């Protein structure tokens, strides 16, 4: 009997458009035509353990230029967030735009200045395309659980311990055993220090496999142990491509624009054999 544990779990890919907590990571560029000011909220932290994450409230100004920039769309606490890393300096300038968790970004979107707590609107498009590869097959590593019986010697009762100690004391009075008589009871009237066991433990290893004549049987139980194995799988690759084109607009005038691309590939399994 086996209990299977798959090392690789296939989960059906879903089309994510910032409706949950999944992150979407874009690589792209930010083009700034007019100086743009980003109001930043304070970020609380523990001064003793993570002081480097502390951030007071204030403004971040980005001057005109063309800069490579990363954008991450996801969740921060109980809010949604767009996090920009603009390579206009070293280290990069980090900008966080937070808005209500109930606001979704669809194919065409507009986040108002009031929603962003900024002095500009963010408007643009987010186009999504999903591509599927032909079905593939092969073997993959996996882990399964197998039952194994484990036995341990049971603790002796107080009476058994006392009898054994008494027998050992009697034997010790006679000095060392004669090499020609390496078994208990070879001396007249000497009690066996291992009552009920013949040969005594270790005298003739393996002579009586599985035989146990002691007064206290061992404790045995079943343990499930992990074992490496392989399984045959069939699957296809599902790649989600996203392109964003967004403008930072103030009073009908575009202050800056961001264009970026994101790609995420997941393995979708159509069949998995038993791990063995």
Image (cartoon, grey):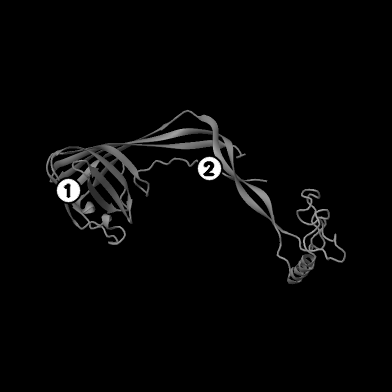
Image position of 51 with respect to 132: above or below: below
The label number, if any, that marks residue 24 in the structure image: none
Q: In which quarter of the image is the C terminus?
A: top right
Q: Label 2: which residue?
A: 7
- The residue shown at (71%, 62%) is 154
Asked if residue 196 is positioned above or below residue 203 in the image, the reply reads below
For this view, does 158 lie left or right of residue 81? right
Which residue corresponds to the image point at 76% horizontal and 68% vertical from the top-left?
Answer: 169
Q: Residues within 10 Å of mark 2 (few under 14, many from 20)?
A: some
**Secondary structure state at the residue bearing disc 1:** loop
Furthest-top residue in this view:
134
x, y percent for residue 213 = 81, 58
Image coordinates of residue 217 in percent, x first then y, are 76, 60
Quadrant hosting residue 193: bottom right
Against 105, is 180 above or below? Answer: below
Measuring from the top left, give residue 52's x and y in whole percent. Answer: 26, 55
Mark 1 → mark 2, Cα distance in angstroms: 48 Å
User: Nearest the camera: 74 or 201?
Assistant: 201
Q: Which of marks 1 and 2 is in front?
A: 2
Q: What element carries label 2?
A: loop
Residue 197 position by quadrant? bottom right
Question: Residue at image x 83%, y 53%?
Answer: 180
The reply, left or right, for residue 191 in relation to residue 135 is right
Residue 120, labelled with which disc? 1
């Amino acid at each position: 009997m086996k209990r299977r544990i798959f090392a690789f779990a296939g989960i059906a890919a879903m089309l994510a458009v910032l409706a949950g907590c999944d992150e979407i990571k874009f690589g792209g560029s930010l083009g700034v035509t007019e100086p743009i000011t980003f109001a930043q909220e304070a970020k609380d932290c523990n001064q003793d353990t993570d002081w480097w994450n502390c951030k007071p409230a204030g403004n971040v100004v980005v001057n005109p230029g063309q800069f490579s920039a990363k954008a991450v769309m996801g969740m921060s606490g109980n809010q949604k967030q767009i996090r920009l890393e603009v390579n206009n300096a070293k280290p990069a300038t980090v900008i966080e735009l937070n808005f209500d968790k109930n606001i979704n970004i669809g194919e065409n979107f507009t986040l108002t200045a009031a929603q962003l707590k900024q002095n500009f609107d963010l408007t643009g498009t987010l186009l999504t395309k999903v591509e599927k590869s032909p079905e593939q097959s092969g073997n993959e590593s996996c882990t399964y659980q197998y039952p194994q019986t484990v036995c341990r010697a049971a603790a002796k009762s107080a009476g058994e311990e006392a009898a054994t100690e008494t027998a050992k004391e009697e034997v010790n009075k006679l000095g060392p055993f004669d090499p020609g008589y390496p078994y208990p009871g070879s001396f007249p009237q000497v009690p066996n220090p291992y009552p009920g066991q013949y040969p005594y433990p270790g005298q003739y290893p393996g002579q009586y496999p599985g035989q146990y004549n002691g007064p206290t049987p061992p404790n045995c139980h079943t343990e499930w142990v992990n074992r490496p194995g392989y399984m045959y799988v069939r699957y296809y690759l599902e790649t989600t491509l996203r392109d964003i084109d967004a403008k930072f607009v103030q009073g009908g005038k575009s202050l800056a624009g961001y264009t970026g691309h994101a790609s995420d590939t997941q393995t979708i399994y159509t069949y998995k054999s038993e791990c063995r």
